[in-house]
Amino acid sequence: MPDANTPLPLPWQMEDWSLIQRTRSEDRLPHALLLTGREGMGKRHFADALAASLLCSSPEIDGLPCGKCRGCVLFKAGTHPDLKYIEPDEPGKVIRIDTIRDFTASESLTAQAGGYKVVILEQADAMNRSAANSLLKTLEEPVAWTFMVLISSQPGKLPATIRSRCQQLQMRLPDPAVAQQWLAAESNGMDTALLLSLALGAPLKARALADSGLLGMRVKLLGEFADIIESKADPVAIAAGWSKLDPALVLGWYNGWLTDCLRLKTDPEYSDLINPDQRKQLQGIGKSIEFKRLFGYIDDAHRAILAQGSQLNHQMLLESLLLPLAGRGSDNSG
């Protein structure tokens, strides 16, 4: 049996795992796999487990790595010569052509230990056009026994030519019962249902939120959001404070509040909220914003989320969202 340091597929990934292992046993493994699905589904974890399986010299009957052979030992030590990771140098940066050329060189695509050469391309949608074109040449003329895994939460940003040359595997949200059972052992006794709701059902994202200080910060920011709408706070000052926090986290919370406001404005009894613990406050906020403006704020939030990977100034981005909220006051015309 593999030890605790050997990456294994997560409980909700077993069906996908079995599918890949079946294609492998039938000698139909693709030369490139595009893993998609929302953030927090464990795409990188799945890719690691798959790489460990392919580099293992004695995998178990279900494809799980043995954890003991030389390939497994090198994998766990992070020194396997036939495993390469490619990702942006810094968050928000692009993957440049030189990075792709470095590994597409003939000597980089040939396995040194025999067997597979595995390349995991994290945030594949971060490739600039030149890098994508360089990768395309390799996808069009694959090297035997070289297996590439492209990981993307926004596959629509990838050129269609790249997507069409990969076998796509979309990781779907797990059954809530399966996710909660796994999360219960990972969340220090916190409310697993709330964590999963805030994470939109993505278990690893829910685990990252399992911090009472973090959830307390969410409530604090929601109060500041309400104060802006009631003209009790300066949106520029609030944006300055929010800009010091994780952009993805703040924008996700902001979008979730607006979404819940719309749901409750449409149906006061709506049950499937993102922020069920803040129903009363969000219902009050929703009542104070007319439908047309609320839809506009949500559209702006979506655009801001998509712009996260760009070089836009985070504080200015937040100001563009919060300034239009100021002075909305009580408006029950919706």
Image (spheres, rainbow, N blue to C red):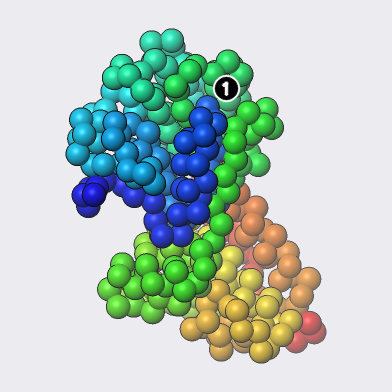
Q: Is residue 140 left or right of residue 6?
A: right
Question: Which residue is painted at 46% across and 28% down in the image?
Answer: 147
Above or below, 173 against 332 in this view is: above
Question: Which residue is painted at 48% across and 78% down in the image?
Answer: 223
Q: Quadrant of residue 113?
A: top left
Residues 100 and 37: in front is 37
Q: Is residue 28 visible?
A: yes
Spot occupied by residue 103 in the image (x, y as percentages of width and height): 42, 19
Above or below, 30 against 218 in this view is: above
Q: Is residue 331 visible?
A: no
Q: Quadrant of residue 245?
A: bottom left
Quadrant for the C terminus, please: bottom right
Q: Please tell me whether mark 1 sits on a helix, a strand or a loop.
A: helix
Above or below, 141 against 14 in this view is: above
Residues 115 and 130: in front is 115
Spot occupied by residue 125 in the image (x, y as percentages of width and height): 56, 37
**Local crowd at mark 1 within 10 Å, few (<14), some, or many (≥20)?**
some
Residues 86 and 142: in front is 142
Spot occupied by residue 130 in the image (x, y as percentages of width and height): 58, 20
Q: Which residue is mark 1?
A: 139
Among all residues in the image, which is located at the extreme top? Answer: 106
Spot occupied by residue 298 in the image (x, y as percentages of width and height): 67, 64
Question: Which residue is painted at 59% across and 32% down in the image?
Answer: 166
Instruction: Name the residue type under label 1.
Output: Leu
Q: How many marks?
A: 1
Residues 278 and 327: in front is 278
Q: Is residue 288 left or right of residue 318?
A: right
Above or below, 260 against 143 in this view is: below
Question: Which residue is painted at 65% across and 42% down in the image?
Answer: 156
